[in-house]
Image: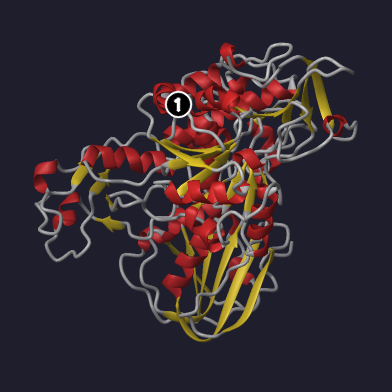
Amino acid sequence: MTHPLHDLRLPGPTLVLVDDSDSLALDALHGIEDVPGLEPTIVALSALDGPRKGWGSVLVVAADRARLRRMASAVPLLGQCKAVACWLTDTPVPWVLVPRPEWPRLVHLAAREAGDRGVLTVARFASGARAQLVVMEMARQAAGPGDTSHGGLVVSYAGRPAAPGLDARSVLLRDVAGAGDAERDVPPDVVVARRGATSQQSVAEHHVIDRAPTVVTDPGPEPVDERVFNPIGFRKDWDHPVVDLARISPGPVTEGVVAAARAFQGVRLPADTPTADLLALAISGVPVVTEGALDVAPPLAAALDAEVDLDDALRREEHSLAVRRAAFDHHSTLAWRSALASRAGVRHVGLPAVSALLSTKRPEMLDFALRQVARQRGAEVELVLAAHGFEPDRDAVRRALGDRPHQVLTFDGSDFFGDVLTGAARAASSEVLLKVDDDDWYAPDAVHDLLMARRFSGADVVGMPSEFVYLHANAEREALTVRRRHPSELFARFVAGGTLLLDRGLLHSLGDFRRVRKYVDAQLLAGVEAAGGRIYRTHGLGYVLRRTGAGHTWQRDDEEFRRPDIVASEWPGFQPSLALEVDPVDRPGPDSTGGS
């Protein structure tokens, strides 16, 4: 049988670096000694206790991107070589490395499938490149662009490997005492050690941080790398019924297993499923059926235990959302590091604060809109209210928002809509901005879920689809809720304008909101696309677009929302997803424009 790397030619000798805990990668290496054109020396990562030099090339082997990123945190100095390759044995889609400008001249770059076993990325240089830095950059780029920093928390590990997620600044120590080494210029805030490790008293106070690094021996279950395992690619439908995990894969859950699981209505897990496998499936949105005790946070356990009718596609997606949100909030690398920072009393950047920009010309909709913002949870949200052509009751705004920070701005009714939003954006105090509309419904987790999608996707703009639309009654028909066939959890060109989330720096680079009377959302998305930005569309369960027939800057015949080719379901009256958790006061009456 032909080896997956049979046509790989690398300058020798080749250091083949593998994590000896990665069973799938180790299995794939069988027979590599017989590949023509290779002079391989297989070295386990745990055996590298110092620099290894003198190689013509380096080949890093891991099961998937998550294992590559964890492995790269511990790669030592490897010297210079003319070729660096990465073989991910159980990853389904090739990825392309973008060379850094400080590297030697690149003479060859390949990204392809490795026969019938995973994918291969190969970079060849005109002169020697520092292999450790190339491997680190491969691990960083494999998860795509976006925030991959440590958030301000410096972690080291004593007597154990690094946690999942790329942590380029982590240091692996023999024992906790090494964290207090006075010669260390960048001492750790936290040392994660095995249970039974030396007590805190054995770590010396460090002169850089004026305290001893905090030793943690009970950090809880290992986190899951949300930059690799996430809902991107979630399917609202399925090809096959619920299946036992062993039928998909007898080994650990990898990217390839998650991709295969997308085709099933759900995956049934035995009671002895490793927590890492459960978390990888849960945070990816794969509907899972569990049994027995689970070593996970109580909110995730509760979400997994909730009864759900998987035969109902909407209930299935709602269940998937609840599970993936709980997994992200309690078991992502972001949550794990935030918990460590809290124990050490160190600042850590988690989900950023958001300024919601609300421009309205309709005083009658203000109470309703304020309630949509006031109910947000799981995120720090400031409201910047831009009253367009009227003076709002500022005391009423304050009462409606309670302790939530807010600003109230007023603009002349003749001002351009784009200028009003630009004024609101410039007044905002947060670095992340969210455009909201005055008449649409938002779930209490809407802002949180947009931030969650921003984190796992690395996209420049994140939004929801206008998947659920409420059509008010008219002379021809009663009120309806329409669910449209909008794909979600994917990169796209369009998201609903009332859910646009982006960094203020990006907005400013585009010239802010364009000076237009209407279609301001379309102008912004076109500008992002023209600048090469990435737009991600997350789930549409937490947002309902309202259509009353008038008063919208986006004019469109209501019947366009009911075209048979785009409608998935219709219900009489107001029937949103359960994820909306609609407040009874905000349910529209037969002739209501919303609110009280």
Residue 115, percent across and down?
A: 72, 62
Residue 158, percent across and down?
A: 26, 50
Residue 420, percent across and down?
A: 55, 47
Q: Residue at x 49, y 79 (%)?
A: 101
Is residue 263 placed above or below 432 in the rendered structure? Answer: above
Q: How many marks?
A: 1
Label 1: which secondary element: loop
Residue 340, percent across and down?
A: 29, 40
- Specify the quadrant of the image occupied by residue 246: top right
Is residue 304 placed above or below 69 in the rendered structure? Answer: above
Decide which of 23, 349 is in the foreground and name it. Answer: 349
Q: From this viewpoint, which residue is outermost toward the bottom?
A: 126
Q: Residues within 10 Å of mark 1 (few under 14, many from 20)?
A: few
Q: Is residue 117 left or right of residue 368?
A: right
For mark 1, what is the residue? 393
Is residue 401 placed above or below 176 in the rendered structure? Answer: above
- Specify the quadrant of the image occupied by residue 319: top right
- Specify the quadrant of the image occupied by residue 487: top right
- Quadrant showing the N terminus: bottom right
Residue type at tag 1: Asp
